[in-house]
Image (cartoon, rainbow, N blue to C red):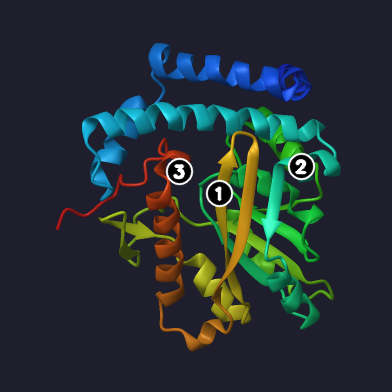
C-alpha cells in the first residue's frame, strides 16, 4: 500500500514539476480558490491568528490578507514540487541570496554557522542553499508519520544537496558533525509552537505570550557557533530573496534567551512589514497565556 501511495505521489510531483511557471500559477490560483471557499482548509484558524496578533487589523484587512495569504501558500506548495525539476541556473533566476559574504567569513575562520529562519516568504527555497553558500548545508526537520509521504518529501528536499537531520536526534547529530573536518551551516526553523513542558521558556510573539523553542541558542552556546538570520522577502510572484543578518557573533557573550529574543524580534519585523507571507495556517498561539 505504501509503495502504491508513493508511486502516485511521485507521479503527481512529476506532473506538477513539469508545468511551465505561467500554468503553475494559474493552477495555484484555482487551488487557492478551492481550499478557501470549498474545502475551507484552516480558514477559521488563519483568521483567528490574525485577530489574536498585535497587527491591529480590522475585519476587512483580515479578509484581504487571508485571501492573499492563500494565494502565496499555494504558490509555495507548488514551487516546492517544481524545485525538483529545476536546474541550478533556473533556481538562481527565482531565488537570490544577499550578504552571503557573512557566512563565507566564518568559513574562512574555520567555523560552522547556525542559520535561523522562519515560516515566512520563500522558506522552502532554502533547500537550494548549497548553490549559494560555501558551507555544507544541513537542515533540521520533523519526519512525517506517513512513511510513503515522508520518503517522497525527503527525496524531494535532498535533491539539491541538502542534508536533513531529524529534530529528535539533532543535538547529538550536530555535535558529531562538529567533530569532523568539514564545516556546516545548520538551518533551523524555530517559530513553531513547542510541546508544553515544565521548563518551557515563554515570550511574547506578535503580542501573545507563548512557549518558544530555545534549541538554536542552546546549541550555539554549547558549540560556540555564530548565529545568523535569513530574512525572506518576495519582491514579486515567483521571485524570492534572502538577506543574511547577524544575530550573534559570540553567543556565549549573550545572556540566556537573549539570542532567542533577537530572533523573535526579527521574525516579527518581517511579519509586520508584510503579513501576507507568514504561515498563518500553523497554530502558533495554541498554548498562549492570557495573563
Dot 3: element: loop
* Crowd class of label 3 (few under 14; some 14 to 19; many from 20; radius 10 Å): many
Dot 1: element: strand
**Percent x, y of residue 290:** 16, 53
Callout 3–callout 1 Cβ contact below 8 Å:
no
Image depth: mark 2 or mark 3 in front: 2
Counting residues from the N terminus, which is met first, the one under dot 2 or under dot 3? 2
Q: Is residue 56 left or right of residue 194?
A: left
Image depth: mark 3 or mark 1 in front: 1
Residue beneath the point at 58% across and 21% down: 28
Residue identifier under label 1: 233
Quadrant of the drawing holding the C terminus: bottom left
Inspect this view and state whether residue 2 appears. no
The CA span between labels 2 and 1 is 15 Å
**Percent x, y of residue 140:** 62, 55
Residue identifier under label 3: 278
Residue beneath the point at 44% across and 32% down: 69
- Find residue 183 and report its image quarter: bottom right
* Crowd class of label 1 (few under 14; some 14 to 19; many from 20; radius 10 Å): many
Amino acid at each position: 500500500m505504501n509503495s502504491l501511495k508513493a508511486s502516485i505521489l511521485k507521479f503527481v510531483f512529476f506532473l506538477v514539476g513539469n508545468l511551465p511557471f505561467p500554468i503553475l500559477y494559474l493552477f495555484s490560483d484555482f487551488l487557492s480558490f478551492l481550499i478557501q471557499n470549498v474545502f475551507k482548509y484552516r480558514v477559521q484558524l488563519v483568521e483567528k491568528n490574525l485577530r489574536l496578533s498585535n497587527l491591529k487589523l480590522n475585519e476587512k484587512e483580515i479578509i484581504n490578507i487571508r485571501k492573499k495569504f492563500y494565494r502565496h501558500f499555494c504558490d509555495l506548495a507548488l514551487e516546492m514540487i517544481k524545485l525538483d525539476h529545476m536546474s541550478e541556473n533556473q533556481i538562481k533566476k527565482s531565488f537570490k541570496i544577499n550578504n552571503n559574504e557573512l557566512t563565507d567569513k566564518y568559513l574562512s575562520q574555520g567555523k560552522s554557522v547556525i542559520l535561523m529562519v522562519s515560516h515566512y516568504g520563500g522558506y522552502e527555497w532554502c533547500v537550494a542553499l548549497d548553490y549559494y553558500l560555501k558551507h555544507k548545508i544541513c537542515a533540521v526537520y520533523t519526519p512525517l508519520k506517513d512513511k510513503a509521504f515522508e520518503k517522497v518529501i525527503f527525496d524531494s528536499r535532498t535533491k539539491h544537496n541538502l542534508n536533513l537531520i531529524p529534530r529528535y536526534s539533532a543535538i547529538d547529530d550536530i555535535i558529531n558533525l562538529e567533530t569532523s573536518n568539514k564545516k556546516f551551516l545548520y538551518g533551523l526553523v524555530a517559530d513553531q509552537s513547542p510541546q508544553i513542558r515544565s521548563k518551557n521558556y515563554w515570550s511574547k510573539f506578535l503580542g501573545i505570550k507563548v512557549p518558544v523553542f530555545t534549541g538554536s541558542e542552546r546549541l550555539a552556546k554549547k558549540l560556540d557557533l555564530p548565529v545568523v538570520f535569513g530574512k525572506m522577502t518576495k519582491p514579486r510572484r515567483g521571485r524570492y530573496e534572502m538577506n543574511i543578518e547577524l544575530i550573534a557573533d559570540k553567543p556565549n557573550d549573550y545572556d540566556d534567551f537573549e539570542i532567542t529574543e533577537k530572533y523573535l524580534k526579527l521574525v516579527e519585523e518581517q511579519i509586520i512589514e508584510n503579513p501576507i507571507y507568514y504561515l498563518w495556517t500553523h497554530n502558533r498561539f495554541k498554548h498562549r497565556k492570557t495573563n
